[in-house]
Amino acid sequence: MAYECIHATTRGRVGLITLNRPKQMNALNPKLMQELGEAMYGFDADDGVGAIVITGNDKAFAAGADITVMKNYSYMDAFRSNYITRDWEHIRNVRKPVIAAVAGYALGGGNELAMMCDIVIAAENAKFGQPEINLGVSPGAGGTQRLARFASKAKAMDLCLTARMMDAAEAERAGIVSRVVPLDKLMDEAMAVADKIAGYSLPVVMMIKETVNRAYETTLSEGVHYERRIFHSMFSLDDQKEGMAAFVEKRKPDFKHR
């Protein structure tokens, strides 16, 4: 399908989405976010796709939300249009793993988009931050909440109150980034990770994603109980029988995704 603000294609069992507003440093406007949601939902519903990669370009993953769109909003404009919630929350409903391949700037909404993904692979030139305070507002797409949960209260306060950027190495130490690679290896690494995930049993992959996400929504005891029930349920899968048989027989499993 042709899009205006993104490119979407498949490579094997991987759905690849490239943000495509280079003149605006991939600033996130409603059109882009609507197209992103449509593409992600399409890949999520496609049995031939096992993982999704979102990327930008070498200069910017996304340098933030498009300020020209929101600068004249009133409170009622933002409230009645359900700004952000209407167009930005799609990724939370995607059940397959989503990998962010980040080069250059991931600031404001760009950083928040990256944090909504399940795995963040960063190029060495990546910069992360929440500079909204410079504009007289706070982060509005989860920046204050996910930073505090994924990194720490101290890191969230630091980035949100000073508007400073952290480089890829610091972001990895803080727990925002999964791994850091040279810029020229970024897409190779991201696609290799996505290919590996997509080669496993899709139901199991989706269950693992759901279970890990549960860790941030509930207590430890409830999370462990949920994990145990999901684990028990996997013994109803054909892929569990195949995976364990292949291990015993010392061969590669042939998963059927059921």
Image (cartoon, rainbow, N blue to C red):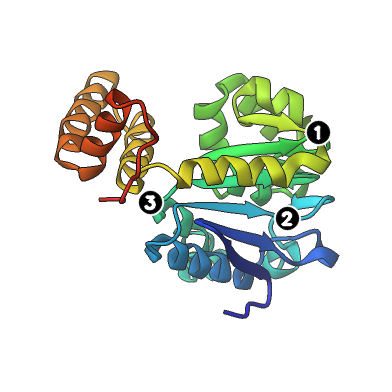
Q: Residue at x 73, y 60 (%)?
A: 27
Decide which of tag 2 and tag 1 comes sooner along the chain. Answer: 2
Left or right? Give the position of 111 relative to 39.
Answer: right
Left or right? Give the position of 54 relative to 22.
Answer: left
Q: Where does residue 138 sit, x and y in percent of width and height?
A: 63, 44
Q: Where does residue 72 sit, x and y in percent of width and height?
A: 70, 69
Q: Which residue is tagged 1?
A: 124
Nearest the viewer among 203 and 58 is 203
Local SS, label 2: loop
Q: How far is mark 2 from mark 3, CA to CA?
A: 22 Å
Q: In the rendered view, would you say 73 is above or below 169?
A: below
Q: In the rendered view, would you say 243 is above or below 32?
A: above
Q: Kindly indicate whether the residue at mark 3 contacts the one at mark 2 (C-beta within 8 angstroms).
A: no
Residue 95 shows which numbered tag?
Answer: 3
Category of crowding for the residue at label 3, using alpha-carbon neighbours closer than 10 angstroms: few (below 14), some (14–19), many (at least 20): some
Q: Where does residue 252 sit, x and y in percent of width and height?
A: 39, 35
Instruction: Give the quadrant of the N terminus.
Output: bottom right
Q: In the rendered view, would you say 205 is above or below 32?
A: above
Decide which of tag 3 and tag 1 comes sooner along the chain. Answer: 3
- Kindly tell me whether residue 222 is visible in this rendering: yes
Local SS, label 3: loop
Kind of residue at badge 1: Glu
- Kindly tell me whether residue 107 is visible in this rendering: no
Q: How far is mark 3 from mark 1, CA to CA?
A: 29 Å
Q: Which residue is drawn at 21% across and 36% down?
A: 241
Q: Residue at x 84, y 51 (%)?
A: 59
Decide which of tag 2 and tag 3 comes sooner along the chain. Answer: 2
Q: Kindly indicate whether the residue at mark 1 contacts the one at mark 2 (C-beta within 8 angstroms).
A: no
Kind of residue at badge 3: Arg
Kind of residue at badge 2: Gly
